Image (cartoon, rainbow, N blue to C red):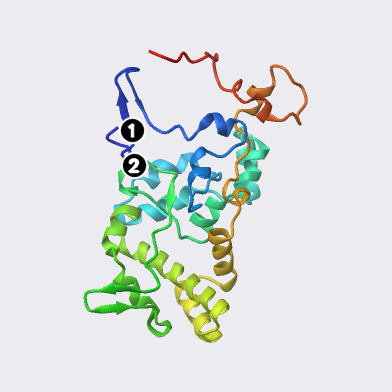
């Protein structure tokens, strides 16, 4: 309970166990996303596969706080690397899981684009949930009036966010402000790039300079915008059915059988019908 960076574990006095969200595991078994995916009106949840090298975990979690984010990234493996694919296959990772890792939206946010960060990396629990820091609005009020995003001095607005960068850093980068600032620069650059395309009030050469200063390309900015704003459920949830072989092996030999038909009969161990009432 004390080690959970999300403070969501509680002790169930009836069962004598610590409990928390199980990420709708019965739904994951049948290839369905968790219920929170459907209930989230903002469509801000993404789920995908990340392959990591377990042999590197101890060394990565032993570095000083300021290097923890980069150390955690070094543990993650490139799912397109032939050597990684062979190692995953030797470790028993199913082909469907490797394919999902190659299409993972989480991998794109965390590794390819570098705009999603772990929560409280300083706890050294290697959390595999990542967050994109919230971007300040296009216009807002400060103590001395309004601030806005002037393309000539775009990145100066990063330090004028409603929440201090030190606060973001305490959440997402173990206190390293530079890591969070780099993410905010990329997000602002994407916003400017899309504004230039839709409104045409910012010259192309100025947009190119802003993207270069933020460390991303025009194609990456376009991809970030599409996956963040124009994504479908299939784009956000890329995960094969879990434990599907246990779910269907008892009464079917067809590899194409629909696991949804077996919902309620899958899982590990014996199934017991829940008893309702006092």
Specify whether residue 230 is in view.
yes
Q: Residue 48 location, x and y as percent?
A: 55, 45
Report the quarter where the C terminus lies.
top left
Tell whether label 1 touches label 2 (CB within 8 Å): yes
Residue at (44, 46) in percent of width and height: 129
Residue at (52, 38) in percent of width and height: 34
Alpha-carbon span between mark 2 and mark 1: 8 Å
59 is higher (above) or lower (below) than 261: below
Q: Residue 218 location, x and y as percent?
A: 57, 73
Q: Which residue is mark 1?
A: 9
Residue at (48, 41) in percent of width and height: 36
Q: Residue 65 location, x and y as percent?
A: 30, 53
Taking the image as shown, residue 89 lies to the left or right of residue 133, namely right
Element type at mark 2: loop
Q: Residue 117 bears which disc, if any?
A: none
Taking the image as shown, residue 66 lies to the left or right of residue 85, namely left
Element type at mark 1: loop
Q: Residue 248 location, x and y as percent?
A: 68, 23
Q: Which residue is mark 2?
A: 6
Taking the image as shown, residue 178 lies to the left or right of residue 43, namely left
Residue at (41, 70) in percent of width and height: 185
Q: Which class describes the residues within 10 Å of circle 2: few (<14), some (14-19), or many (20+)?
A: few
């Amino acid at each position: 309970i004390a080690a959970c960076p999300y403070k969501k574990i509680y002790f169930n006095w009836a069962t004598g166990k610590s409990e928390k969200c199980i990420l709708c595991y019965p739904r994951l078994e049948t290839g369905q996303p968790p219920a929170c995916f459907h209930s989230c009106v903002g469509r801000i949840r993404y789920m995908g596969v990340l392959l990591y090298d377990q042999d590197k975990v101890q060394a990565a979690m032993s570095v000083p706080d300021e290097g923890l984010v980069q150390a955690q990234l070094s543990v993650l493996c490139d799912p397109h690397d032939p050597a990684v694919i062979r190692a995953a296959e030797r470790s028993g990772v199913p082909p469907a899981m490797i394919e999902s890792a190659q299409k993972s939206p989480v991998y794109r946010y965390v590794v390819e684009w570098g705009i999603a960060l772990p929560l409280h990396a300083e706890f050294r629990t290697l959390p595999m949930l990542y967050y994109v820091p919230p971007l300040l609005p296009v216009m807002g009020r400060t103590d001395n009036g309004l601030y806005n995003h002037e393309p000539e001095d775009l990145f100066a607005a990063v330090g004028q966010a409603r929440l201090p960068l030190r606060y973001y850093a305490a959440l997402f980068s173990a206190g390293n402000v530079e890591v969070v600032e780099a993410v905010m620069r990329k997000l602002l650059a994407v916003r400017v790039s899309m504004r230039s395309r839709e409104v045409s009030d910012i010259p192309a050469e100025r947009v190119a300079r802003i993207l270069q200063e933020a460390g991303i390309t025009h194609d990456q900015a376009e991809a970030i915008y599409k996956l963040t704003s124009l994504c479908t459920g299939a784009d956000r949830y890329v995960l094969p059915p879990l434990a599907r072989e246990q779910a269907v092996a008892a009464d079917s030999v067809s590899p194409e059988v629909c696991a949804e038909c077996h919902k309620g009969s899958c899982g590990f161990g014996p199934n017991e019908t829940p008893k309702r009432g006092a």
